[in-house]
Amino acid sequence: MLSYSFAPAAPAPDETPPQDGPITLTRDSISLTVDPSYGARLTSLKYGDRELLNVVRDSTGFTYGSTAWPSPQSDWSWPPPAALDREPYTVQKVDEHSVLLLGKEDSSGLVFQKRYRLGPDSDIGLTYWLTYNRDTARAVAAWEVTRLPYTGRIEFFADSVRTEKSDGVVESQDSFRTIYLDDRHPAPAKVFANLDSIPVRYYVDGLVLEKHTVVQDFYRVAPGQAPLEVYIEPQRKFAELELQGDYRELRYGETATLRTKWRVVAY
């Protein structure tokens, strides 16, 4: 997960952004739908006709699809800042396999820009630029939060894990960890994991969603967070697979960047 000062990209001068409404990108077996009107959220990820995201929208509208937040959560508690998470974004540029979107500035001075790009190998490149526009310094990281159906399993390698609210959520064999999304876990729980390798894998319905990011020695985690976090809600039938970006101090106009790569394959 890399962080550095970056000038957010602008649309090409000869390209007119499309009208509002969901945008679906398709390449080979992958289709990805983005909703600019609702926080530039990913509302669908399909391999053929099989859906991988939780697409059931509850009355709050918070717990479906994939989004991005600022980290740590202690800075804003709950719900996430509306301007970053669920208010409309402007479509800056769209082509056959990618879309670039810019959000509104939050009252804290933070603004997100998001880019989603379909690659040639059933892969998806996701980039989140979190820019700070205040005169005082602020430490922050970008944070990718992906809601999954409560079925299948999540696998990863981690040096250590800790849980909140419920023990026994993670099954371990040395550093290899598994979280089963089934009825063996009756209550909500949160897992915080110190990754020692990538990717993190989600298995469901004959498919695997791999999430890749960068974990290096210089990587800094926001207070109270972890490089990988998994939140399960058995009763509400969803789970969250979360990746944290590098936590750094920003001054006016500086940007923290989180890049992830997803890959979907049949097994």
Image (cartoon, rainbow, N blue to C red):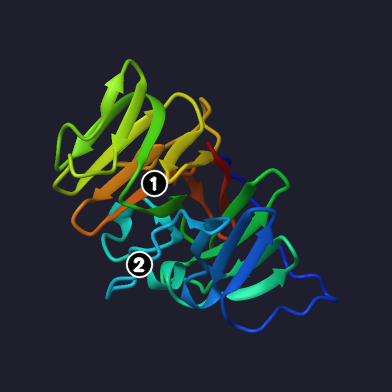
Q: Residue at x 42, y 53 (%)?
A: 146
> From the viewer's perspective, is 129 left or right of 97?
left
SS of the residue at dot 2? loop
Which residue type carries mark 1? Leu
Query: Which mark identifies residue 138?
Result: none
Q: Reply above or below: 174 against 14.
A: above
Mark 1, other Cα within 10 Å: few <14 / some 14–19 / many ≥20: many
Q: Residue furthest right?
A: 14
Q: Is residue 231 above or below residue 42?
A: above
Q: Which residue is mark 2?
A: 56
User: Residue 130: image x %, image y %?
Assistant: 53, 57
Dot 2 crowding, Cα within 10 Å, few <14, some 14–19, many 20+: some
SS for callout 1: strand
- Foreground of the two, 140 or 231: 231
Position of 179 with respect to 158 (left or right) is: left
Task: Tell whether 134 sits left or right of 238.
Answer: right
Q: Earlier in the sequence, mark 1 or mark 2?
A: 2
Q: Position of residue 254 (x, y in %)?
A: 59, 55
Disc 1 designates what residue? 241
Q: Is residue 147 visible?
A: yes
Residue 55 % position (x, y)? 40, 65
Residue at figure coordinates x 65%, y 46% from the top left = 122
Residue at image position (75%, 70%) is 11
Give amino acid for label 2: Val
Q: Is residue 161 left or right of residue 251?
A: left
Asked if residue 134 can be seen in this view, the reply is no
Quarter of the image for the N terminus: give it.
top right
Would you place residue 262 above or below residue 26 in this image? above
Q: Quadrant of residue 204?
A: top left
Q: Is residue 261 above or below residue 28?
A: above
Q: Are marks 1 and 2 in contact (CB under 8 Å)?
A: no
